[in-house]
Image (tube, rainbow, N blue to C red):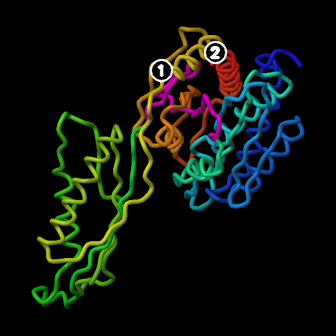
């Protein structure tokens, strides 16, 4: 086999074809059956040791090494479900098909190498519902791992085409789903009822007044509110959803505590019963200097040092950071790939310059090679 970096360059057309095929079989979280089978077959055919699991479609593929430690690379496989031109369907508008493609060809490029450490490729399900990383950790995929890398395509305004950043600093996110129980009544006799929609309006205004010390960045806003079926009746109940985001895990903890306090106070003030659950928690990124340095070296080697972009600070969330939240001693980083992505992530018409898949896979390959030699 040629040099792994050259292998990727020589297989440009196959990379683009693989991306096209994965894009066409977009599957929602927990339903990544075709995607998983497609990737497993290609990796097994190249001689990698593939391990699948019985309760989800995630899997790992390995290239054995001589040393005990493991150099790992993670890619996500699932797609969003969203409306496109009036049709609701699975759609790869977050680039997971791109991530799987780049990780696949990184594995194929290294398949005939003799690494010092075992190379482990983690193909993860259910990222969009913030469950996949936790599932994979339960399977023991971080066992003996001494380095973990990942990659995510970035919008054009964050990282320019032809550049890459060695770290994406995602924030923390959570969802609060709740219901408000009031007292139903005829709309002509509102004094006999207790309107849960009015209680929701008090809640919304109170949440808007949250302030945290230290000028910390955060947001908490209502994204769903449902209540009532007719114009002449006060409903018994209303249900709501809050989207919660914070720049750090500590800020998220403080924000959720304030939100809980406000919900309790509004329930008492309005004499309603408010029940709620906190769901979909994703931790913020933890920056590792060791991992960022390895990523910088790889980007500089492939694209030139002038194309190493600064840290990408993202208000979005990513369940990759569960890995470092649960195991902070493992050096880990997620590379941000400039690819002229427009209009933006999760937009149903998202597209990007697929030429970036080639240098993205080269960067990942070089990063794993660097980690193998230096750790």
Q: Foreground: 280 or 118? A: 118
Magenta span has 152? Answer: yes
Relative to residue 327, is residue 128 depicted above or below?
Answer: below
Q: Residue at x 45, y 28 (%)?
A: 287
Image spot of residue 213 (x, y percent): 17, 38
Q: Which mark is residue 26?
A: none
Please tell me which of labels 1 and 2 falls first in the chain: 1
In the picture of the structure, the residue carrying the numbered disc 2 is 374
Which secondary structure lies at badge 2?
Answer: helix
In the picture of the structure, the residue carrying the numbered disc 1 is 289
Image spot of residue 255 (x, y percent): 26, 49
Q: Residue furthest front?
A: 68
Image spot of residue 312 (x, y percent): 45, 27
Q: Foreground: 104 or 321? A: 321
- The stretch of residues the image draws in magenta is 142-170
Distance from Cα at disc 1 to Cα at disc 2: 14 Å
Pick the quarter of the image with the N terminus: top right
Image-based side of 149 in relation to 199, left or right = right
Q: How many marks?
A: 2
Q: Pointer 2: residues within 10 angstroms few (<14), some, or many (20+)?
A: few
Which secondary structure lies at badge 1?
Answer: helix
Image spot of residue 334 (x, y percent): 54, 31
Q: Pointer 1: residues within 10 angstroms few (<14), some, or many (20+)?
A: few
Q: Residue at x 19, y 34 (%)?
A: 214
Magenta span has 11? Answer: no
Relative to residue 132, is residue 64 depicted above or below?
Answer: above
Image-based side of 288 in relation to 219, left or right = right
Q: Residue at x 85, y 45 (%)?
A: 41
Pick the quarter of the image with the C terminus: top right
């Amino acid at each position: 086999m040629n040099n792994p970096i050259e292998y990727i360059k020589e297989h440009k057309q196959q990379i683009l074809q693989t991306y096209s095929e994965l894009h066409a079989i977009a599957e929602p979280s927990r339903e990544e059956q075709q995607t998983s089978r497609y990737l497993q077959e290609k990796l097994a055919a190249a001689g990698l040791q593939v391990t699948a699991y019985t309760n989800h479609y995630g899997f790992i593929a390995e290239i054995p090494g001589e040393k005990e430690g493991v150099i790992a690379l993670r890619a996500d496989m699932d797609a969003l479900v969203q409306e496109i031109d009036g049709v609701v369907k699975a759609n790869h508008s977050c680039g997971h098909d791109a991530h799987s493609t780049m990780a696949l060809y990184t594995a194929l490029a290294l398949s005939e190498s003799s690494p010092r450490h075992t190379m482990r490729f983690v193909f993860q399900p259910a990222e969009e519902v913030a469950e996949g990383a936790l599932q994979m950790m339960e399977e023991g995929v971080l066992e003996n791992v001494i380095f973990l890398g990942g990659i995510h395509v970035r919008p054009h305004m964050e990282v320019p085409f032809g550049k890459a950043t060695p770290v994406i600093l995602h924030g923390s996110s959570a969802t609060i789903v709740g219901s408000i129980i009031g007292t139903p009544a005829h709309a002509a006799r509102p004094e006999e009822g207790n309107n849960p929609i009015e209680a929701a309006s008090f809640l919304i205004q109170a949440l808007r007044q949250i302030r945290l010390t230290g000028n910390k960045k955060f947001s908490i806003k209502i994204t769903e509110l449902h209540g009532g079926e007719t114009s002449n009746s006060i409903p018994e109940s209303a249900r709501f959803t809050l989207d919660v985001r914070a720049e750090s895990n500590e800020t998220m903890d403080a924000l959720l505590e304030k939100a809980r306090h406000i919900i309790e106070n509004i329930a008492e003030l309005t004499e309603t019963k408010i029940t709620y659950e906190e769901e979909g928690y994703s931790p913020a990124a933890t920056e590792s200097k060791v991992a960022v340095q390895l990523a910088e070296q790889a980007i500089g080697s492939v694209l030139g040092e002038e194309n190493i972009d600064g840290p990408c600070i993202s208000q979005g969330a990513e369940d990759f950071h569960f890995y470092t939240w649960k195991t902070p001693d493992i050096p880990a980083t997620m590379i941000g790939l400039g690819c002229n992505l427009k209009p933006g992530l999760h937009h149903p018409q998202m597209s990007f310059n697929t030429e970036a898949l080639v240098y993205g896979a080269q960067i990942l390959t070089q990063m794993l090679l660097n980690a193998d030699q230096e750790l």
